[in-house]
Every structure is written in structure tokens, then in C-alpha cells.
Amino acid sequence: MGKRLIALLLAKGYPVKALVRKGSEERLPPGAVPVIANAFDAKTFQDEIPEDSIFVQLLGVPHPSPGKKELFKSIDLVSVQASATAAKHSRARHFVYVSVAQTPTKMMQDYQQCRAAGETSIVEAGLSATFIRPWYVVGPKHYWPLFFQPLFKILEIIPATSQKAKALRLVYLQQMLKALMFAIENPVKGIRVFEIADIREF
């Protein structure tokens, strides 16, 4: 998602700085300025964030699953806490955070709790922000949930399962990228939230 978003921003003429680990600079789209730093330590990158800029937080554990509870805490949560601290220090205008839907299912409760705590850290930092809350993003190498679409359509109709099925609706990568671009190009004062239904409108 990050590479595609950077490419879209560069194509529209926006200057982009991207936080990367040492050795990953060449993976960035041409034109992006690499910031080599520790994503878990605000002091290593806070002075690289221009004042009045838009900060986008995409870092997280790849392929989230119930067995990655400790990784959610040590990677997802710690990185967004560091980013919130850095963005506040630099007086960033707006913070865009890809969070997760708070669904009525307990199957990914640890992940949901860590992302909710991430949102709280941004609010407590006093930042204006957009929280984008998908459940599962369908895209390259992540198309398998489409096989279950017919089942979900049926479950949405049945009263006993309708609420949960709607809470687990899929969103597509292009919808996420459009939601991210909208959030970046239309910063707000305070907190704005894009739930699954909002993302699917893009």
C-alpha cells in the first residue's frame, strides 16, 4: 500500500519523505526522499518531518493473525506512539492512520485493541487526524476472501448474522488508496473517521 500511495502522491506533484530502514532506500518509488531512522524512536526522525505537513502512518505487522498478539504490541502500537510523538514535535498539520474496524467479533481482538490504543495515542497527542478503519483489504496476493463473498451476501440478509457480516465487509486496495488520498488532500481540524461503509464509497 505504501509504495502505491507514494507513487500516486508523486504523480500529483507532492513532495514525499518516507521513513525506511537502512538498506531499503532502493525500494522506494523514484522521487521519494528516504528518511533512514528507527520507526520505534521518535527522536530519530521527528526533525525530518516538515512543519505543517501531513503524516501518514502505515507501518504494521504483515499478514495479521490471532497468533501475533505480542507483535501487535511491540510493532504496531509502539510505532504509532512514536509517530504521534514525532508528529506533535514537528507540528504536523494532520495525521492519517490506517487503523482497523472495531467489529463485534473476537477473532482479532488483540489486533483491534492495539489499533484502538494507537488511535488514543494520536488523540492524546492533540493531533488532528483521520482514522481509516478497514477490516480486510483485498488486493494483490490477498484475493482469497473473494471466494466467501456470496456467503457474506447471504449472512447480511439474515437478521441474526446481519450486523456481524456487515462489520466484516471487504474493501479493495483501490478504495483504500482513494480514501488515503482524500484524507491527505482534505485535512480537518479534530478527528475524522472513515469506517468500512465510508471506505467503500470511494
Image (tube, grey):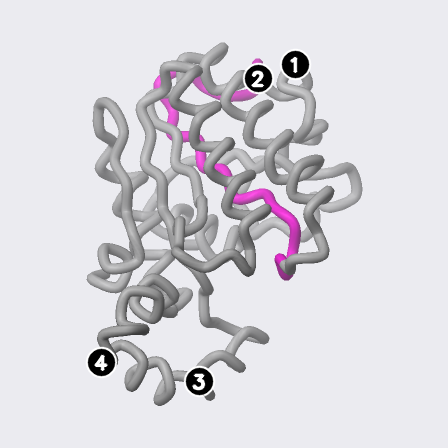
**Residue 76 vertical position relative to residue 62 in the rendered view, above or below:** above
Q: Nearer the viewer, mark 2 or mark 3?
A: 3
Which residues are the magenta region? 47-64
Q: Secondary structure at mark 1?
A: helix
Q: Nearer the viewer, mark 1 or mark 3?
A: 3
Q: Nearer the viewer, mark 2 or mark 4?
A: 4
Residue identified by numbered label 4: 157
Q: Position of residue 21 (x, y in %)?
A: 73, 38
Residue identified by numbered label 3: 148
Amino acid type, callout 3: Phe
Q: Secondary structure at mark 2?
A: helix
Q: CA distance from mark 2 to mark 3?
A: 43 Å
Q: Is residue 102 left or right of residue 112?
A: left
Amino acid type, callout 4: Ile
Q: Nearer the viewer, mark 3 or mark 4?
A: 4
Amino acid type, callout 1: Lys
Q: Which quarter shows the C terminus?
A: bottom left
Q: Residue at 55% across / 39% down in the picture? A: 114
Q: Nearer the viewer, mark 4 or mark 1?
A: 4
Considering depth in this image, is 169 or 80 the residue closer to the camera? Answer: 169
- Ranked by sequence position, the earlier of labels 2 and 3 is 2
- Ranked by sequence position, the earlier of labels 1 and 3 is 1
- Ranked by sequence position, the earlier of labels 4 and 1 is 1
- Ranked by sequence position, the earlier of labels 2 and 4 is 2
Q: Position of residue 33 (x, y in %)?
A: 57, 36
Residue identified by numbered label 1: 43
Q: Is residue 154 left or right of residue 118?
A: left
Q: CA distance from mark 2 to mark 4?
A: 48 Å
| Residues at circles 1 and 2 in contact by the CB criterion of under 8 Å | yes
Q: CA distance from mark 1 to mark 2?
A: 6 Å
Residue identified by numbered label 2: 46
Main SS category, magenta section = loop
